[in-house]
Every structure is written in structure tokens, then in C-alpha cells.
Image (cartoon, rainbow, N blue to C red):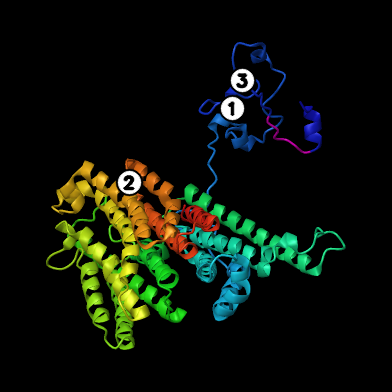
Amino acid sequence: CIPSWLCVAVGLPHITFVRLTPALFLPGVKGKMAGEDIGNGPSSSTSGLRKRISTPPSTAAKPREDERGLGELKLQPPSFGDSGSSLLKVRRLKDLLARLGFVGIFIVENALHATYFEHEIQGMVMPALAPLPREVAVSLHLVHVIFGSFGALFVILSGFDTGGRTMLTKGTSMMLVFMTTITWVWWINRGGVLYWDVDPYPFWDVRCSPEKRNRTVHILKNFSIIGSLTMYQQMAKYEIEASPARPSFLEGLVTSLRLWSCVGTLAPHFVLLAVLQCIDKLTLPEYSTTFALIIALCAVQCAANLVNSYRDYEKGIDTEDAGDRTLVDRLVSVTLLKVLAALCGLFWLVYLVWAMLKTNFHPGVVSLPMLGSYLAVGYTAGPFPLKYWGLGDLAIFIAFGPGVIAFSSTVLTGAVQWKAILFTMPVTMYVIGTLQANNHRDLESDKQRGARTLAVILGHNLSLKYYYFLLLGSHCAALAVGASFGCIGVLGSLAALPQSIWLCIRIHRKSTLRTQDEETAKGSMMFGVSLALGIMTMPGMEVSRLGLGVCGLVVFVLKMFTD
């Protein structure tokens, strides 16, 4: 207790003395000041302490906030910004320059990687991954260029994302994958010489070579960047939890395109490219031809997604409980959705004309795209929407399986490759599992609105068993195809088996059923990538522990990234 004369002398006229009691720390219980009645104990009769030493007359009638019990004070949790604005939003030029300084260099770096792609494959990536085949080096360097460039771009654009922080979390995840893999290739195992094999001395030793010291600096720098990206990502995730917000315009665009569903196009084509090069030993055209093919197929799929979203909303199928929130939540307007669909369709048509000219109007290149486009768009549109007559699964199987693989193999090699079609069928089965997850989730609502999807026809129990068959049957089908053609590499697909089993368990949880289709798409990506890597590393009947290890490692990285 400070004597009153000392407080007055030093100019502290408003000191409040509080007796600490358990009541002060209990929520909802008002604390008591010293000198007030707080119970029957001996301290209740204490009168030596005063609440205030002196109080100006003008404020005596109005209690100050610091004179209240702690129970009367309203403690507000920290806020990370209102629902329409984020602390991570760019507000000044300095904010933008900071982002550009942090990740802008990676856009320039990956532009150089793309420019000198072939040279770096031969001189840097292949020696660092030896004895893995060249195809693995090409795939990894593609990951470097794509993830590094788009990850950095997402981090920069996220500063203008006024709603959610999805773009920032995804961008930092992509950059984390880029930084960890590039650190191994460029510095830890540079040129096929491991860091610890450069010389026997630690980097702080005066006898350490300049090469090892240079590598040390870059490795530590990259670890620092990885730590910064992780911290940045966690800040965004904490802000999302603390201050949920309506999806922004940028996030609405990504959601409307349903880019995650492009896995249905990518995964079978990974296996196609692996079979053409490692089993059939065919020479593929330049990288630009393959890239243009993949982008064009993703464009037509996005166009089909937009058309299907519009038709389901127009027919009243997509309502408040629907999984597709594009128009239900007004993420984009109907006009913008139509514009996006037209742009995606136009890109596909331009590529299709080019492909016809390139192949001299090959019958497969002319007819198969027409069939696939009809099936993709006619899934919910047209006078006979296939989805609502139980034919949706068959349509998607043809469009994402034999039809598109026959078209792609013709564009790349000049002929239909039937062996590649058979190897990609297990992946297509998994893609159909994504569709089945969506239809099983919407089973009751589709039944009420008269939509006869295959899940509605089968009923709840058989619909679940059909889902099990598609996912687990994909693994069995891959093993069967591998045994038929003498390729032990199909064992690599077993690296994704735990994910498939987890998905079969997850579909029973109502709390997570809404995102089951998206999670199944992630599983199909893991399955397709592990199968393609297995074929590349083990195209014959000789088992490679290194190849199996690579399949398991990549599936683990994909799992960490997608979560």
C-alpha cells in the first residue's frame, strides 16, 4: 500500500487499490474493491484502505473504468480485421514493393528456368536425381517452373484479395514445394555431388572449400525463406479462423472454374506420357505441343464446369444445400459465368483447329473432340441431360478415359495407342469416384428434384459400395494391367492406397461430406502421379526400391500440399 501523502506528492491522485480474490478471476462474477463487502472473512471489516486517494468533484459521481471489478470489464478477443478487409491486404505502395521484393525474384528465376529448360535438365536436374530416369527429372523441373512461378504470382495477387486468404495459403504452399525441391537439386546434391562429400571439413573450418561455403550460404538462405513462407502461411490461416469472410472476387473466379476438377484431365495424361515414353519408347514432340494440349483440355473442362453450374442452377438443382456454390452464393454473376465459359470454349476451339491442321485432319482428331465436347457439356445441358438419366458416369468415363486419351495420343504420336488407353483406365475409374462422391452427397436433394443420377438409382447403401468399388478397384485394375504387359511399376500406385482407404471411411462423416468430391479429386491426383512415377522408374519386371521410395515420397508431399 502506497501512503496517501506520497501519492499526492508525486502526482498520482487516482490510484485504485484492488484486493485480489478468486472471484476476480472467475468469468461472470463481479470483483469487489477493497473496503467493500466481499464476504464474512476478517478482511471484510478492513477499513484502512480506500478506493481512491483523491477524486476530482466533477468525476466523483461517474465511476472510472479502472474502478470496476474485472467481471464488469468486457474483454474482446483480438480481431484480425473485419470481414471485408485483411491485415495482409496491400494498402500502400510499400506493401506491394515488399511482396515484390520477397517473391518477385522467383518469377524472374523461373522464367530463366523455362528459357534454359533443356540445358538445366541435362546439367543440373538429371545428375541430382541419378539414377532415376530422365522423365522424372523433366517432371520435377516442370514442378519447379509451374509451382515457383504461380506460387509467387499468387502471393503477390493475394494482396488485392479483400475477402478470403485462400490465394495466399495456396501460393505459399506451392512455393514451399518449389523451395524444398530446388534446394536439393541446386545445392544439396549439386551436379550429383552431395554437400557432405565436397570435402571433409565443416563450413566454419578455415580449411573448408569455397564451393562448400557457397553451398552452405544458399542452403541456409533457402531454409530461411522456407521458414518465412511457413510463418506467412500460418498468419493467413490464423486470420481465416479468427475473421471468416465472404469469398472475394478472385476466389470466386477460381471457385466458379472448379480448377481442382482439372485433376480428372491431368492424372490420366501423366500416365499416358509415362507409357508412351517408357514402355512404348516413342519420341514425343516438343514441350510446347504437350503443354498446349494439356491447357486446352483443362480449358474445355472448365467450360463444361461453368455450363453445368449454370444449368443446375437454372433448373433449381443447386440450392442452399448444394455443393456447387458458384451461383448460389453469387460468387460470380450469371453474365460473368457465361463470358468465362465462352472464353474457355474459344481457347479450346482455337487449339482444336490447330490440332486438325497439324495432323492433316486425322479422323480421330476430328471426331473424338466432337464426341468428348458433347459428353462434357451434355452432362447436364441439352434436351437429354445425361446426368439425370443415370448415364453421367458412362459419359464421363468416355470423355476422361478412352476418348480423350485416344485423341491426345493421336496428336502426340500420329496414331491411337491402345496400350496407353488400357493403362489409363484405372485412373479414369478413380476420376469417376470423384463424380460419385458428388452424386452421393446430393442423393437426397437430387431425388427430391427428380434428377435420376446413378447414386439415386442405386440407393444409399449401394451408392456407398459403388464408391468403394471405384476407388479400391482402381488399384486392383492397375495391378492387373501391369501384370498383363509386364510392368512391375504399377506397384507404385499402392503408395496412394492409404488415401483411398481413408476416403472410403471419410464418406460416412456428414460433417465432411460436402467436400468429399474435392478430397477424392486429390486422391485421384495422388493415384495418377504415383502410377506414372512407378511406370517411369520401373517399366519392366525389375523391382526398384528407389522407384518405390520416390512414389511414396511424392504421395506424401502431395498429401501435405493438398491439406
Q: Quadrant of residue 101?
A: bottom right
Q: Which residue is mark 1?
A: 25
Distance, label 1 to label 2, CA atoms, is 41 Å
* Type of amino acid at the residue the image marks with label 2: Leu
Q: Nearer the viewer, residue 31 or 59?
A: 31
* Marks 1, 3: nearer the viewer: 1
Give whichever of discs 1 and 2 has the lower sequence position: 1
Q: Which image quadrant for residue 217?
A: bottom right
Q: How far is mark 3 from mark 2, CA to CA?
A: 57 Å
Inspect the magenta stretch and tell me whether residue 66 lies in it: no
Q: Which residue bears the numbered disc 3?
A: 36
Cα separation, mark 1 vs mark 3, equals 17 Å
Magenta stretch prevailing secondary structure: loop
Tell me residue 6's x, y (percent): 81, 31
Amino acid bearing label 1: Phe
385 above or below 445?
A: below
Left or right of 304? Residue 74 is: right
First along the sequence among labels 1 and 3? 1
Q: Quadrant of the N terminus?
A: top right
In the picture provided, is 261 more to the left or to the right than 121? left
Residue occupying image coordinates x 60% and y 60%: 180
Q: Position of residue 117 (x, y in %)?
A: 55, 78
The front one of 375 and 198 is 198
| Residue on which disc 2 sits | 513
Looking at the image, residue 238 sits to the left or right of residue 198; the answer is left
Span shown in magenta: 11-16
Asked whether the beta carbons under mark 1 and mark 2 sit within 8 Å of each other, the answer is: no
